[in-house]
Amino acid sequence: MDRNRLFWASRRGMLELDLILMPFLDHVYPTLEEADQRRYQRLLDCEDQEMFGWFLHRQEPEDPDLRKIVRIIRESRRPQP
């Protein structure tokens, strides 16, 4: 998926998700291995409410690939020492 499509797919209907996904797309996504980039692209097909629950640690995705990319995104939001 090209950068422009990724940008628009990462813009969600929920401000909270935009505040998580947009910085991730700008700063972390370009550094990911291709397999993890594909996982991110799959994540974008998920419902906003599901993603919101995953990022707030309310639930975990059942799919191991989605679980991996959710964890990568969560870790990218932790403050760096």
Image (spheres, rainbow, N blue to C red):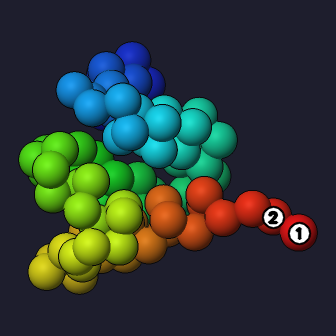
Q: Is residue 27 visible?
A: yes
Question: Within the image, what quadrant is residue 12 found in?
Answer: top left
10 Å crowding of disc 1: few (<14), some (14-19), many (20+)? few
Q: Is residue 14 left or right of residue 48?
A: right
Circle 1 is placed at which residue position?
Answer: 81
Residue 76 image offset from top left, x and y in percent = 61, 60
Looking at the picture, tell me which residue is in the foreground, 32 or 51.
51
Looking at the picture, tell me which residue is in the foreground, 40 or 52.
52
Q: Could you tell me which secondary element the residue under label 1 belongs to?
A: loop
Q: Residue at x 58, y 69 (%)?
A: 75
Q: Residue at x 48, y 36 (%)?
A: 19
Q: Do callouts 2 and 1 mark residues in contact (Cβ within 8 Å)?
A: yes
Please count the marks in the image.
2
- 22 to 39, vertically: above or below: above
Residue 28 image offset from top left, x and y in percent = 60, 49
The amino acid sitting under disc 1 is Pro
- 37 to 48, vertically: above or below: below
Residue 73 image offset from top left, x and y in percent = 48, 60
Q: Quadrant of the N terminus?
A: top left
Q: Which mark is residue 80?
A: 2
Q: Could you tell me which secondary element the residue under label 2 belongs to?
A: loop
